[in-house]
Image (cartoon, helix red, strand yellow):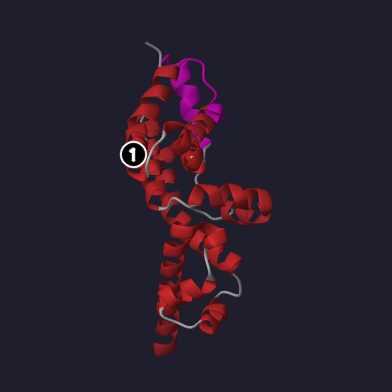
């Protein structure tokens, strides 16, 4: 029992240390030795738990995504209106990515490099489902609440407007001549700006 607890504690320390390093330096800049130091173990012990940096990155991704997925799934499948779902999704997503800024680029990189890995994530029971969201969009269109709107296209718009600024952070900072603090403020403002923009584009007046 003590050995099992030691193993679990060590793995948690590794994942926490890796998360910090990946947040600061990204996948390419992270070094296994630095992660081992952060976890308080030697590099050999780190490789015992995770044979490569890629496997460790994937473990961190799964750990963090497991926190985000239930939040998004709850928003998409609760009984709130589409307007409230858009506000909830935008607020939760931006808040979450501000805490885990490496995730968007990793997701895109991983989808292009290793589609099979993301497909394995999709098979998890907690992966967000769009079924109810799409039906609800169709119902609100039929009721005259929304303009003619396709649920899938609406979801793509929500995701795109939320994720792009984080993926293109260096480009946006350069175009707008922003420092890190100013970029953070801009992202905080987008919680309202994106929601209002989308809602105003689909809601009947």
Examine the structure image and report whether residue 72 is included in the region drawn in magenta.
no
The residue at 48%/83% (across/down) is 42
Location of residue 19 by image quarter: bottom left
Let me know if residue 100 appears in the view: yes
Q: Seen in the image, is 109 located left or right of residue 93? A: right
Q: Quadrant of the N terminus?
A: bottom left
Hey, which residue is sitting farthest bottom in the picture?
2
Q: Dot 1: few (<14), some (14–19), or many (≥20) neighbours within 10 Å?
A: few
Q: Is residue 78 visible?
A: no
Provide residue 183's location: percent of width, then percent of height.
37, 40
Whether 25 is drawn above or below 50: the answer is above
Residue shown at 43%/14% (left/top)? 144
- Is 80 left, or right, of 168 in this rendering? left
> Which picture quadrant has residue 116?
bottom right
Above or below for 137 versus 4: above
Where does label 1 land, which residue?
182
Residue 180: x, y in percent?
37, 45
Q: Is residue 31 above or below residue 9?
A: above
Write the start and end of the magenta stretch as one range.
131-153
Q: Quadrant of the C terminus?
A: top left
Magenta part, dominant SS: helix
């Amino acid at each position: 029992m003590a050995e099992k607890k030691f193993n679990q504690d060590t793995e948690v320390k590794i994942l926490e240390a890796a998360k910090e390093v990946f947040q600061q330096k990204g996948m390419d800049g992270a070094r296994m030795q630095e992660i081992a130091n952060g976890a308080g173990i030697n590099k050999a012990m780190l490789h015992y738990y995770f044979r490569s940096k890629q496997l460790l990155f994937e473990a961190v991704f799964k750990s963090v995504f497991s926190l985000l997925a239930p939040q998004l799934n709850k928003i998409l499948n609760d009984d709130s209106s589409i307007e409230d779902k858009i506000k909830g999704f935008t607020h939760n997503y931006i808040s979450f990515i501000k805490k885990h800024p490496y995730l968007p680029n990793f997701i895109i990189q991983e989808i292009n490099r290793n589609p099979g890995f993301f497909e394995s994530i999709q098979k998890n029971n907690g992966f967000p489902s769009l079924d109810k969201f799409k039906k609800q969009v169709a119902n609100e269109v039929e009721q005259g609440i929304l303009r003619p709107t396709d649920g899938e296209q609406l979801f793509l718009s929500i995701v795109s407007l939320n994720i792009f600024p984080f993926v293109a952070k260096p480009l946006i900072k350069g175009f707008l001549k922003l420092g890190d603090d100013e970029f953070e403020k801009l992202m905080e403002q987008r919680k309202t700006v994106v929601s209002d923009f989308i809602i105003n584009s689909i809601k009947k007046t």
